[in-house]
Amino acid sequence: MKCTNCATKLDEEANFCPKCGLKRGEKPTGESNMVLVCSKCGAALKEGKKFCSKCGANASETGVMKPKEETTAAVNNSSEEAYKKGKAFLDIDDYDNAIDWFTEAITRDPQNVNAYIYRGDSYFSIWKNINIDDFEFSDDFEDECKEKKKKMLDNYNMAISFSPNALAYLKRGCYYRYIFENFDKEKDNINKAISDFNKAIKLDPKSSSAYYERALAYRFNNQFDMTISDLTKAIELDPEDANNYIWRGCTYSKIERYDEAISDLTKAIEHGPKNAIGYAWRGYAYKMKNQKDMATKDLEKALNIDPDIKWIKRELSEAKAM
């Protein structure tokens, strides 16, 4: 026989539990610290149920009493393990398996915020890669896109509802900016993006990614001074990231500050020598300064790295014609 309060095994002659002192056979007063769980899968067993609702094991054979804090820790640990498996699949672009494991993590712990965030990322990636040629009817394509977008946003929103955090706001902001950049130029989308990036920065003022993403949102909104300000902050926080220099450099070009553009793009090339965009934008800046040889050299280098970027071909033709 076991103690009804702490599950300590009682000797046949014992009248009281040696651990908690409860009298043999008596039920504990108040809320017990113990909970009946399945020893096979760790799930809590519901009173009166013959089988575990999660793994199907016979409750009478696998049921054990455990302290609540141990059970909670076990659930959290098992959820974290499932989350890590999901993240591993996401890292190799296996989005379907990633979603399955993130869903399992959420099943084990419905408040696993990171599982929601990265399940949202998985749906985002699937949505961006949906090919209309894979569908017989355009309506089916539209329905699939809507479904994936809804699931993506639902996951980011759930993460924020459980724990407002910088990463969730950052991810949702990137979605709104992507929509504005590629599909819907409604101001509401870019305003939502900037609002989410603002919240991310407030929660994590040292996030270079948040400043970088907000800078791009400002740039697409033609707020170039704000773009440069945010990229300057991003560089301060992460001076090794070539993308920060590239975008500040091309923004300087946009407002015809070509010397500053060349300086930034040179730094971008130093940090990312195989990045075609760095050479391309520096070549463009040289072209605008009427430095034909430098422009041609950079634009040819960019095309050698990535021959499929059409606008670089156009700029190179114009540079050679100078």
Image: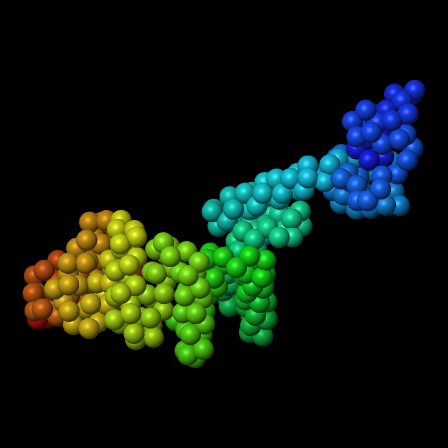
Q: Residue at x 41, y 66 (%)?
A: 198
Q: Residue at x 52, y 59 (%)?
A: 164
| Viewport quadrant of the N terminus | top right
Does the image show residue 128? no
Q: Position of residue 211 (x, y in %)?
A: 34, 61
**How was this image coloured?**
rainbow
Q: In the image, 8: left or right of 318?
A: right
Q: Quadrant of residue 228?
A: bottom left
Q: In the image, 30: left or right of 240?
A: right
Task: Please state which of residues 197 and 301 is positioned toward the viewer in this rendering.
Answer: 197
In the figure, 256 relative to 113: above or below? below
| Viewport quadrant of the C terminus | bottom left
Task: Please state which of residues 192 and 309 is positioned toward the viewer in this rendering.
Answer: 192
Q: Position of residue 184 (x, y in %)?
A: 44, 76
Q: In the image, 247: left or right of 63?
A: left
Does the image show residue 257? yes
Q: Residue at x 36, y 69 (%)?
A: 217
